[in-house]
Amino acid sequence: MPILRKPYLIFLADITVGSDAKTGAGLRDWCGVDVIGECRLPQGTVSLGLPTLRPQEAASAGAGSLVIGVAVVGGQLPRTWLPPLAEALEHGLDVVSGMHTRLTSFPELVAAAARGGGQLVDVRATDRVLPTGTGIKRAGKRVLTVGTDCALGKKYTALALTRALHAAGALATFRATGQTGIMIAGEGIAVDAVVADFVAGAAELLSPANDPDHWDVIEGQGALFHPAYAGVTLGLIHGSQPDAIVLCHDPSRQTIEDFAHIPMPALRVAIDRYLEAARLTNPDVRCAGIAINSSSLGEGDWLAYQSSVAEELSLPVCDPMRTGVDAIAHRLLQPMRRQPE
């Protein structure tokens, strides 16, 4: 698992659309104390409201890494970005990327790293040998965020839940499984880049045996109901051996995003399918609550929806950004009745 050097200088490249900076925004929002500033190309118009620093200035201020804070379609790294990345390397900064294009595929970056002593860190790289899953029970407690679909708040829910557990006095560690989560945590495994046979083993490695009262809060990926990404979800479930799941949902979606022919599952059905899958490696798994991305709802509609779902499912219903997830954390820390199979 890569361990990243902090603090970070966030590279915003030449983007002109704010949503393209979601990686940088996630770092600002969830590990702001580890972010020293931002830099961009002259054509770029997006700012995260951070101090603007050149790589040399950031290095002098104690930065450890320049992080590519943008996500572009296809995950390819444009050659126009290479000069500022090389500049960072020559001043001793590591360059961290979650793109599909490997930094090491550019000879000029390899040479700049050799000159300045910086490292090229591709957080999606999977060169290390990973084990296959064993299904053997291990000590400690684990909660996994799962979803009715992709890209609806599993990472934010896991981060918020980690904070809520800490606030309640519990031992808890966020376990990152995607590139932005890894950058926030400083370590982790990007499971969407792991060969299918080893996803469960990677999840076991990511959340090893721990103290009996320690919670690993594992960032979910994909969705069991997604026609392209259900496979990574299932491997992550089996390897995580969760004691509890938290179901994430966006009520504005009627179908799986970008797959209009796949209907969104009912929440009860989704919970049942996730628990059924998880019982292979943990027969005592439970659902601890529902995390809603309610950004499409006004306050009145949100309160009505929250009340309706809570009554239907007899579970705490929260929005990590709107209400926090204290109610879910509280339920995790209380003895819970096993839900019927």
Image (cartoon, grey):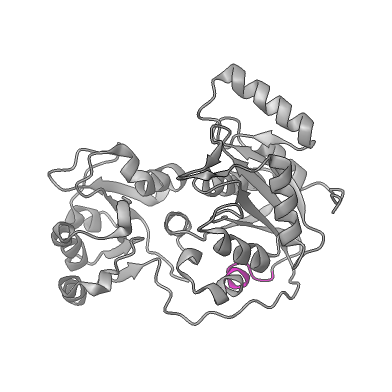
Which residue is more in the foreground, 181 or 162?
A: 181
Position of 95 with respect to 130 (left or right) is left
Position of 275 with respect to 146 (left or right) is right
Q: Residue at x 28, y 46 (%)?
A: 37
Which residue is more in the foreground, 8 or 221?
A: 221
Which of the 4 quarters of the picture holds residue 199? bottom right
177, above or below 13, in the image: below
- Answer yes or no: is residue 65 visible: yes
Q: Residue at x 15, y 72 (%)?
A: 108
* Residue stretch rendered in magenta on the structure: 202-209
Q: Residue at x 72, y 65 (%)?
A: 211
Position of 49 with respect to 256 (left or right) is left
Position of 167 with respect to 69 (left or right) is right
Q: Could you say where residue 325 lies in the image, as x and y percent from the top left?
A: 64, 38
Which residue is more in the foreground, 276 or 171?
A: 276
Residue 203 colored magenta? yes
Q: Could you say where residue 125 lies in the image, as x and y percent from the top left?
A: 39, 71
Q: Could you say where residue 81 lies in the image, as x and y percent from the top left?
A: 18, 57
Which image quarter holds the C terminus?
bottom right
- Answer yes or no: is residue 188 visible: no
335, above or below 218, in the image: above
Q: Could you say where residue 340 lies in the image, as x and y percent from the top left?
A: 86, 50
